[in-house]
């Protein structure tokens, strides 16, 4: 993981976030800032800033962000995260156990397994 951090810098984050609205890119830069004083002081402050980004996006597009939008976005995020996890496992197998975990096989969360 340290190798990944050393090999990627702000320009890589900017490239990956290029399609995001400017407000979201600014939040992302703030979350990842090297200086702690320039990052969000709490999860609540970040949540408030993210909500404001959503309000700005609704104003910009004129389209509300409802439950169906949230479900579609979560589905996309889970799919993207799974693909990235597979890439990371190839780079450093010690990060995750090889193969699927029991809760992944059953499709149920760890509490239900």
Image (cartoon, rainbow, N blue to C red):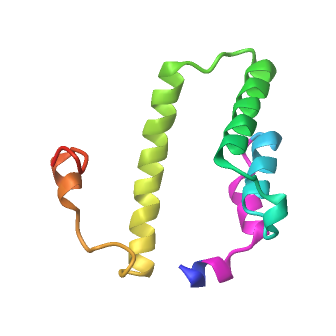
Residue 26 coordinates in the image, percent (x, y)? 81, 49
In the image, residue 8 lies in the stretch drawn in magenta: yes
On screen, residue 63 above or below 41: above
- Residue appearing at x 75%, y 43% in the figure: 24
Q: Quadrant of residue 52?
A: top right
Residue in front for this viewpoint, 61 or 67: 67
Judging depth in this view, the residue of 26 and 110 nearest the camera is: 110
Q: Is residue 11 magenta?
A: yes
Query: Where is residue 17 drawn, in percent x and y?
Result: 71, 52
Instruction: Indicate the position of residue 31 as horizontal and vertical percent values.
Output: 73, 56
- Relative side of 103 to 12, left or right: left
| 81 shown above or below 90 | above
Residue found at x 75% / y 53% = 41
Magenta-tinted stretch: 5-20
Examine the image and state in which quarter residue 15 appears: bottom right
Q: Residue at x 64, y 77 (%)?
A: 5
Tell me the chief SS of the magenta region: helix
Q: Is residue 78 left or right of residue 63?
A: left
Residue 33 against residue 110 in the figure, above or below: below
Residue at left 65%, top 47%? 43
């Amino acid at each position: 993981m340290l190798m990944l951090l050393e090999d990627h810098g702000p320009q890589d984050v900017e490239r990956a976030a290029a399609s995001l609205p400017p407000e979201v890119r600014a939040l992302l830069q703030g979350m990842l800032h090297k200086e702690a004083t320039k990052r969000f002081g709490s999860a609540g402050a970040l949540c408030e800033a993210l909500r404001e980004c959503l309000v700005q996006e609704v104003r910009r597009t004129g389209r509300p962000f409802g439950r169906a939008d949230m479900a579609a976005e979560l589905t996309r995020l889970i799919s993207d995260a799974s693909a990235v996890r597979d890439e990371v496992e190839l780079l450093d197998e010690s990060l995750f156990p090889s193969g699927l975990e029991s809760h992944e096989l059953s499709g149920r969360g760890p509490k239900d397994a």
